[in-house]
Amino acid sequence: MKKQEVDSFENDYVETIDDVAIADLVRAYGSPLFVISEKRLRENIGQLTQAFAARYQPVIHAWSYKTNYLNAVCATLHQEGSWAEVVSEFEYEKARALGVPAERILFNSPAKKRAILERCVQEGARIHLDNFDELTLLDAIATELNIPTPVTLRLNFSTGYTEDWSRFGFNLDNGAALDAAVQIGKSSHLRLCGLHSHIGTFVFEPKAYQVQVEKMCAFMALIEQHTPARIESLDIGGGFASQAAHQGVARLAEQEIPRFADYAEAICTTLLKIAAQREAQGKPRLSLILETGRAVVDDAQVLISSVVARKRLPDGRASYSMDAGVNLLLPVFGHHHRIQTTRFLEGIAEETVLYGGLCMNTDVIKPSIQMPPLQIGEPLVISPAGAYNTTQWMQFIDYRPKVLMVHDNRQVSVLRRAENLNDINDLEFLPTHLAEINLTGV
Ligand SMILES: Cc1ncc(COP(=O)(O)O)c(C=O)c1O
């Protein structure tokens, strides 16, 4: 058997979420359950924007919908002033339905189709150009509709610190980005006014962002000299690490993860120097745009899942089947999650495997953890579970569960009810000749 990294548990337990007893939540709403702390979400976005605004202004945060697009999460962040960053027609429509004005929606995607581009041009959304086909199509649409259209150019390049995300946007080093800026410069209806790049996710090294800003600003100077582009905003995407260490990172998450202030220092120190030079040339101040996703929401949401069955494995290890599996916790494949009980556990710790409830050998929540015996019905709190969970979750084998939000005053709201058979069957059509079944055997 492959040697596994064994997590130590050390009777790590948590009884409440924002003063609401977890045991009461499970009694009242069942298990499994996702639970979001409104307080933590507001604190996180406040800390992020404060860290930046104290060093540079103006700063805009655009909420990356794909990270967690539950309406209540988006609405909380929009109340805190965040714009929307979307990557599909669905996400765009969600943001519009929540009341976000089109001009405060940033549209990233490598595959925007004509219909959504037309809508974005008509409504005035901020389109982040990804490729030459899109550029040519958008130019044609803006010309046909006769609507002057501001655009942002998405760039890709190497920072030397992160894996390259070279499939998105225009490459700086091979001249594609410059060619795109020149092509936009010749358009009668497109106006290049923003630069964007997203250098990756879980970026542990703040210096990566310093290099990013330097490269973007060098390109900005080049295109402002050689094309009609006048850049008003610099969007540095997302990528700040959250408190969920990557699998295989043999260090304590808390020790490794930079604070918002560390990222802000690296970014703003560089940007301030460039802003000062631009202002000396009479150019307006650049807006700094952040699309931080996971670092804002990951630790604000947990998954509560309970033990359904116990089994001693043939090699002697303890194992449990839980009522939630990788269908609800897809990021489990990439990250370490903290497992907490809701009470102090008596008994001797032993090596334990926590399985999900799916009929799949790979449905493993924790391959190896030292913990005392658990009882049937024992709820475990799995965290963080706020980023890319309630967007990437699958309706596979079982229904998706309720999502709750705990508010500051200990009130609890159901943000999303559990699925039922009708939800799924409503999308299907049964051809009439299949309406009757016959189970008498072959
Ligand atoms: C363009 C863009 N912006 C923002 C984000 C959010 O990134 P993160 O959750 O790592 O902050 C992503 C994630 O992939 C992205 O692709």
Image: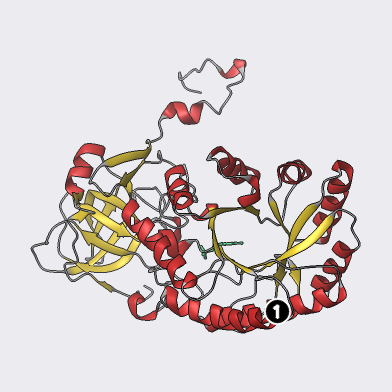
Query: Which residue is painted at 75% across and 75% down in the image?
Result: 220
Callout 1 amino acid: Arg
**Screen quadrant of the N terminus:** bottom left
Q: Nearer the viewer, residue 12 or 66?
A: 66
Whether residue 72 is situated above or below residue 417 in the rendered picture: below
Quadrant housing residue 339 = bottom left
Q: Nearer the viewer, residue 364 or 17?
A: 17
Visible residue check, residue 260: yes
Position of 41 with respect to 135 (left or right) is: left
Position of 411 with respect to 300 (left or right) is: left
Query: Which residue is painted at 85% across and 68% down in the image?
Result: 228
Location of residue 26 in the rendering, given as x and y in whole percent from the top left corner:
22, 43
Location of residue 376 in the rendering, given as x and y in whole percent from the top left corner:
17, 48
Q: Which residue, given by chain and number where applicable, does mark 1 sit on?
A: 278
Q: How many labels were placed on the picture?
A: 1
SS class of the residue under badge 1?
helix
Scheme of colours in the image? secondary structure
Quadrant housing residue 136 = bottom right
